[in-house]
Amino acid sequence: METFIVQEIFIYAELNMDRRKIVGAFAVAALMTLAVATAGCTSTSPSPTPRPFAQTATTTGNNTTLTSDAGFQITFPSKYRYDQNGSTPVKFYLYLDPNNTVTGLNIGTDAQPANATLGSLSDYYYGRLLDQHYQNFTVVSQSNGTLAGKPARTLTFQALIPVQYSEKEVRNQTLQVQEIWTLNNNTGYIITYKAPPSDFSKFLPEAQKIVNSFQLR
């Protein structure tokens, strides 16, 4: 399915990048880990085979609310097209630009160890970024905050990413990406907003409004 391929390739595509450049960028990230000494932690890899989760969508007026047994709920304008899949790490993908399927917002979940903390979750997501070997990776900003009342980390970056629009069409695109990470009940939640740099600010207010509707269950 074309739309689902786009979101999967974005998160898990392998690109070519000098790992030392990313390590240098993430030296700055230590500032946002506060008292959590993530450099001394060894991450335990979560289960590679997520179990399927049921998801339901209910439309009331101009808004649709998606409720997932993966432990979250989110509301968005009904005018936006979306995909959902309960059995993969990416549970939900919302298309914000009808003219460009790469511009959108998605929600993923990852099982974490029983002793997981926001610090160890950050290690896990940092490591996953390192494993992607993004070309031209540049950290734009990073901060601490909250998501659905839980402590969260936000990282915005830019990189050259091969986007697969169909089985036969792959295009290298520079994208600006904002990831928000939080932990609840030994599950890591990652909300990703992405767009070409020229459109990032244009769709960001709508993406933030949708993110603000995110609830943990």
Image: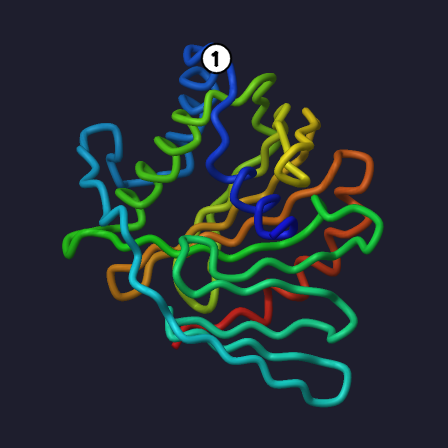
In the image, residue 42 sits, relative to residue 50, either above or below, namely above
Quarter holding the C terminus is bottom left
Check the image and name the residue furthest to the left: 115
Which residue is drawn at the image coordinates 68% and 52% (left, top)?
A: 104
Q: Circle 1 is placed at which residue position?
A: 21
Q: Secondary structure at mark 1?
A: helix
Picture coordinates of residue 55, whole percent (x, y): 47, 75
Picture coordinates of residue 116, whole percent (x, y): 21, 51
Picture coordinates of residue 90, whole percent (x, y): 47, 54
In the shown orientation, is residue 14 left or right of residue 131?
right
Q: Quadrant of residue 169?
A: top right
Q: Amino acid at mark 1?
A: Lys
Check the image and name the residue furthest to the bottom: 60
Which residue is drawn at the image coordinates 69% and 89% (left, top)?
A: 60
Q: Closest to the observer: 204 or 52?
A: 52
Which residue is drawn at the image coordinates 34% and 55% (left, top)?
A: 188
In the shown orientation, is residue 171 left or right of residue 22?
right
